[in-house]
Amino acid sequence: MAAIPASEIGSATAGDDYLPTSGNGGYTALHYDLDLDYRVATNRLTAEAVIRARATQPLARFSLDFAGLSVVKVTIDGARPKKLAETTRKLVITPEQPIAEGDEFTVHVRYRGAPHPIRSAWGEVGWEELADGVIVAGQPCGASSWFPCNDHPADKATYRIVVACEAGYTTVSNGELVSRSSRSGRTTSTFEMRQPMATYLATVQIGRYRSRAVTPAPAPAAPVAQALFYPQSLETQVAVDFARVPDMVALFSGLFGPYPFESYSVVVTHDELEIPLEAQGLAVFGRNHVDGAHGSDRLIAHELAHQWFGNCLTVARWRDIWLHEGFACYAEWIWAEASGGRPADASAAAYRARLDALPKDIVIGDPGPQGMFDDRVYKRGALALHAVRRALGDEVFYTALRAYVAECRYGAVSTEDFVEIMEASSGSEAVGPLIERWIYSKALPKL
Ligand SMILES: [Zn+2]
């Protein structure tokens, strides 16, 4: 048998220097169709993933990220592959015939097992059992704990996610609930995410949740359908704490541009969670984030802002994570200011003083894999945006910010994109030098 030429082997990495073992080269994913049959009581998953992809080079062999579950059967365009190899993190597939550059192909993977989180440098990520249910927190490399994928944020695709589990549980996933039916004590829910989504933002939440639709506030664009999912015991507190979400949606839609997805859901788990998390079209909070006294307004604004910054506009490489976290942090200050709390100027001064007392040994535009979720990335990123806003003035700043969001909508972004679009839209050359000082230098600039 002739060896496969190296030029026809899709790389088993997306080439991201922060997560070199995640993602794959040689193709781009277009659509994931995930059919999950899950038993909460025993944590058993039987599933089928249908992945439609397009080859970006001649492809005699390619890989998918996949960890911890057993493959039952794989086909490509309906045929058995010539060769299938499994490593701890990858599924390596050699089709019978090489795929030509530009051709679309469909991979079916049937699999099963007891899903569990992946151990990573950022803790355990992925599919995780709650005391009575499931949470999926995929960032940054947990998606492959529950479906085979090209796990890199820049390779976005649309999704259809079907989840069947014991009746009595409520399932929440990304996008629109298009059907729900019950039979023989099991409930099947089908969701469609019709806007491109990064793998780490795909999620399934299962719990004994009550649900409630929320009346959206008038927004500059069409009103956004909103819903809350929560344990019955927290009903009163949840109603108080999340009452302002419609106003936040309206505020951010005005400042950043229309809310980018069809709906927004909030899940509050029975369990305590270390931190809330964002997924596309929803956010998840723990019971400890709910107090019935608006104690988590800051976090609620933060997670909502990720729908624009992180989910709609997603980093092309992880080193630019400040484009997610700095922006979401700044949205906290904007919400506080707009809702009668601390002005953004005062937040900026307070956080700059705090940062000044910390070691200045991080470049937040390239914080290193261990520094991706360092709080200084969040706060200094927000300060950078505040400095740009002060230099441009509110009207020019928000007009340029909306141009950045509109131009990069549903795509992958870099710091260079941000600077280029902000400067082009504002006509100011001040953005580049400010970003250079705030994002690419260690010394802390003055405001
Ligand atoms: Zn965040």
Image: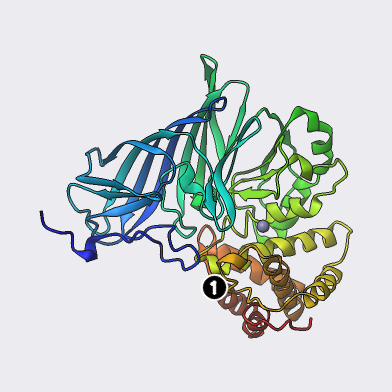
Locate residue 271: give its quadrant.
top right
The x and y percentages for residue 277 are 65, 49
Residue 333 versus residue 438: which sits nearer the camera?
438
Q: Is residue 403 found left or right of 343 in the rendered image? A: left
The x and y percentages for residue 357 are 80, 76
Residue under the image location 59 percent in, 65 percent down: 370
Q: Is residue 443 found left or right of 367 in the rendered image? A: right
Q: Quadrant of the C terminus?
A: bottom right
Residue 423 versus residue 112: which sits nearer the camera?
112
Indicate if the residue with disc 1 has its beta carbon within 8 Å of ligand 1.
no
Q: Can you identify the residue that label 1 sits on?
A: 417
Q: Is residue 212 visible?
A: yes
Residue 249 versus residue 44: which sits nearer the camera?
44
Locate residue 253: give its quadrant.
bottom right
Dot 1 crowding, Cα within 10 Å, few <14, some 14–19, many 20+ = some
Depicted 4 relative to depicted 70: above or below = below
Depicted 86 relative to depicted 186: above or below = below
The x and y percentages for residue 96 are 18, 47
Q: Is residue 74 found left or right of 198 in the rendered image? A: left
| View extreme (left): residue | 1
Q: How many marks?
A: 1
Q: Secondary structure at mark 1?
A: helix
Q: Quadrant of ligand 1?
A: bottom right
Residue under the image location 86 percent in, 40 percent down: 292
Kindly identify the amino acid type of the residue bearing the numbered disc 1: Asp
| View extreme (top): residue | 184
Q: How is the image coloured?
A: rainbow
The x and y percentages for residue 173 are 57, 38
Residue 349 versus residue 410: which sits nearer the camera?
349
Residue under the image location 62 percent in, 62 percent down: 324
Q: Is residue 299 found left or right of 73 in the rendered image? A: right
Q: Is residue 197 visible?
A: no
